[in-house]
Image: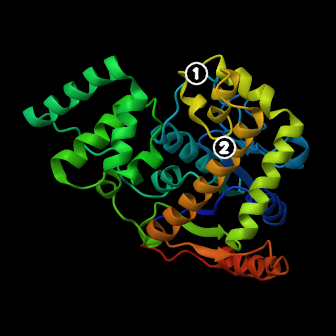
Amino acid sequence: MAAKQKIIVIVGPTAVGKTDLSINLAKKFQGEIISGDSMQVYKNLNIGTAKVTKEEQQGIPHFLLDEIEMTDRYSAGDFQTSARKHIKEIGNRGHLPIIVGGTGLYIQALLFDFTLGGREDNTIEKQAIRRQWEEISETKGKTFVWEHLRQIDPAAADTIHPNNLRRVIRGIEIMETTGKSITEQQGDITDLSASLYDVKLIGLTTDRELLYERINHRVDLMMKEGLEDEARMVFETPDAQSAQGIGYKEFFPYFSGEMSLEEAVTQVKQNSRRYAKRQLTWFRNRMNVSWWDLVQRPEKISELEEELAKWLEQKEEEG
């Protein structure tokens, strides 16, 4: 049996230094980087997604950035297919694939062998539930259906865009017929030995209050860089999946004259902090992550690099 491909996966909340670490490790270990972020895949969404710039990439190859138009749909299944293809190609070049992102479902879909959403079951009961919510969406809108999912299954709602109606309804259907979350159907996977890859899963975190300060500061910088104009561009296509991203949708009431710019920026900061908290909770509860605080302990990067060097030298056990 062939040895598993070694990959590094860097996860954690926004504004904690994932991009900087990925560049440093790629330079040290001949790495190429794959974005595991659900928003950075969109063209022209640069500021609000904190997308790594060409200058910041320092010549390191990056993949799954600027792949699709703002109005296109993108799912965890799409990411799973594309990222696995890039991992294979990077490995064939003799380089180390490094996946970087905070979208938990994407990382889980990549690492483990499961079918997203589970097998469709066309019982009469499930068909009735599907029809019911499809009709509700036509009269009350997709957001209303997603809000219902959020009430009965917050964990699922955190991983599904409100505009992805099929997945939202699937989540409702599973919860109503089994009493379990769709995320449970996908498996509570913490054993990395079951991964399709020989994976080193690195999580970045820091003190909660410090993290929140960094998030607030990042939003202020985004505003100086032109976040408002970028959000206004997204506002022109409010029904697009990309319009649900944090950093964009919060401006819509401001553009409609329903709140002040200051209130919109405050909302961006608040939603970004809440999302960071959910990201940390998701990875701590569902994946076996090795956590590092390189914000308060930057000197620890040497220890991390030594650990990675030893791991890369290890031969994967046969069979």
Which residue does the numbered mark 1 point to in the structure image? 238
- Identify the residue at horizontal 73%, vertical 75% (top origin): 293
Front residue of 178/189: it is 178
The local crowd at label 2, few if under 14, some if 14 to 19, many if 20 or more residues have their Cα within 10 Å, is some
Question: Would residue 43 be found to the left or right of residue 53 on screen?
Answer: left
Q: Secondary structure at mark 1?
A: loop
- Identify the residue at horizontal 57%, vertical 64% (top origin): 280
- Identify the residue at horizontal 76%, vertical 44% (top origin): 50
Q: Split into 4 quadrants, where in the image is the N terminus? A: bottom left
Q: Which mark is residue 267?
A: 2
**Can the viewer see residue 92?**
no
Q: Quadrant of residue 141?
A: top left
The local crowd at label 1, few if under 14, some if 14 to 19, many if 20 or more residues have their Cα within 10 Å, is some
Front residue of 266/194: it is 266
**Residue 94 higher or lower than 267, as above or below:** below
**Residue 6 higher or lower than 87, as above or below:** below
Front residue of 154/77: it is 154
